[in-house]
Amino acid sequence: MKPRAVYIHIPFCAHKCHYCDFTAYVVDGQPVDQYLEALEQEMARTVEETPPTTIETIFIGGGTPTVLTPVQMERFMQAIQRYFPNRSEDIEFTVEANPGTTDPEKLAIMKEGGVNRLSFGAQTFRFDLLKKIGRTHTVEDIERSVEQSRMAGIDNVSLDLMFGLPEQTVPDMEEALARGIALYPDHFSVYSLKVEEGTLFHRKLLEGKLPLPTEDDELEMYLLTRRRLMEAGYKQYEVSNFSRPMKESRHNTTYWLNQPYYGLGAGAHGYTNGIRHENVRGVSEYIRLAHFRRPVAQMHRVEEGEAMENHFILGLRLMDGVSRTRFERLYGKSPEAVFGPVLDHLQKRQLICLKGDRYLLTEQGLLFGNEVFASFLKEVV
C-alpha cells in the first residue's frame, strides 16, 4: 500500500516552551534556508525511492512552521507542490501555527500553496498560565489569528488545549473551553501535560517546584472537556480529539489506522514499504547528511506481530474502534486468534467491549487507555 499522507517537520520556533521535548530549536541564528534546501533534497530522494500516488493529506508540524518568513514559506510551498503534485480534490492540507505568527501575507502564501486547514496551539486562555508554561502569545493573539485565518479563506481551524498544567484549576479549564468554543473552530485536540525528561518542567519537578493539579482534578478536567465539547456539538472521535461533523483530522487518522505515510524533516518519523524510520534530530547533521543520502537515523522493518500490536494499540484510540473484519482481511487471522486472552481479560474488566464487528473502549476504558494499550504489547500468540 502506497502512502497517501505526508508529514513534514519544520523544527524551528520563536521560543522553546517549558514542556516541549519535540525536535524544536529557537529560530534565531539557525540555518533556515540551508534546512529548506536539505528538505528539498530529502523530498527528491524519497519520492524517487517511493513514488507517490494521489496524496490525500499533508501535515506540516514543528516546532512552529509559521516562523518561516514569507519568502521562505513561499519556497517551501513550491517545493511541496513540486514533489507531491498529484493531490486529491478534497485534500486536507494542515499547517501547525502558534497564535500571533500568521500575518495576512503569510496566510495568503499558504492559501496559494494549497493549505486549507490551520491548527493553532492555543493551550489555555489564561494569560498568566500561558507565561508559566513558556508560551509567548496572548489570548488576543489566539482570537486574532483565528479571525485572520478565516479572512484569508482558510476556514477549517483546529485549536489545541492542554490540561493538567501547573496551577491550573478546573474553573480555568471551564473558561478555556468556553472561550475556545466561542471561536467556533471545527476541531479541538485536548491533551494532558506530560512532563518529559530534558525539559525545564522536568527539572522543576525534580526540584519540587512544579505545582501540578491533583490526579482527581486532572480527571475532572478531562471529563469536563468531554462534557462541554459534546454539549457544544462536537463529536469525540478519538481519545483526545473532537470535531464538528466531517471535520475529523484525516491526517492523524492515518496514524491511528496504522496506514503508511511519508515522514520528512529533522526528527520526523515515517512508515513506507513496511519500514518505519526516524530521521536525525539535529539541524546541522540533517543538512550535512541530506547532501548525499536520506538523513535517516534508524529504521526497522515492521514484522507482522508488531503490525498487529500497533493495529490494536492505535486503533482503540478511535471511538470507532478496531474492526474484526478489517483485521482479518489484513492479517489472515481473527483478533481472537491473536489476542484472545487479552481481549477476554479487558472485557471482563469492562475496559473494552465488542459491539457488532468492532472492539471499542468503554467509558471506563477511556479513562485507563494507557493500561489498555499496554496490554497488547508482546502478546502476539
Image (cartoon, helix red, strand yellow):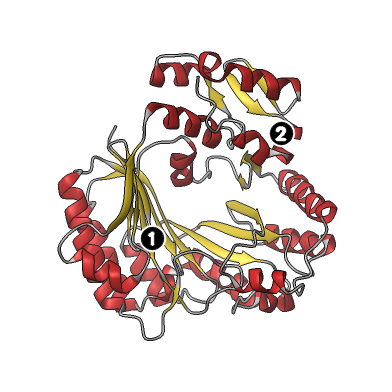
- Residue 353, position as x, y percentages in the image: 68, 22
Say above or below: 296 vs 239.
below
Which residue in the structure is indicated by mark 1? 267
* Residue nearer the viewer, 70 or 155: 70
Q: Kindly report which numbered mark, 2 or 1, lies closer to the viewer in this rendering.
A: 1
The 10 Å Cα crowd at callout 1, few under 14, some 14 to 19, many 20 or more, is many
- Residue 32, position as x, y percentages in the image: 31, 77
> In this rendering, would 55 be left or right of 24?
left
Q: Mark 2 or mark 1, which has the lower sequence index?
A: 1
The kind of residue tagged 2 is Gly
**Residue contact between numbered discs 2 and 1, judged by CB atoms under 8 Å:** no
> In this rendering, would 270 be left or right of 48?
right
Residue in the image at 38% along x and 60% along y: 267
Residue in the image at 76% along x and 75% along y: 209
- Residue 217, position as x, y percentages in the image: 83, 55
* Residue nearer the viewer, 268 or 73: 268
Which residue in the structure is indicated by mark 2? 365
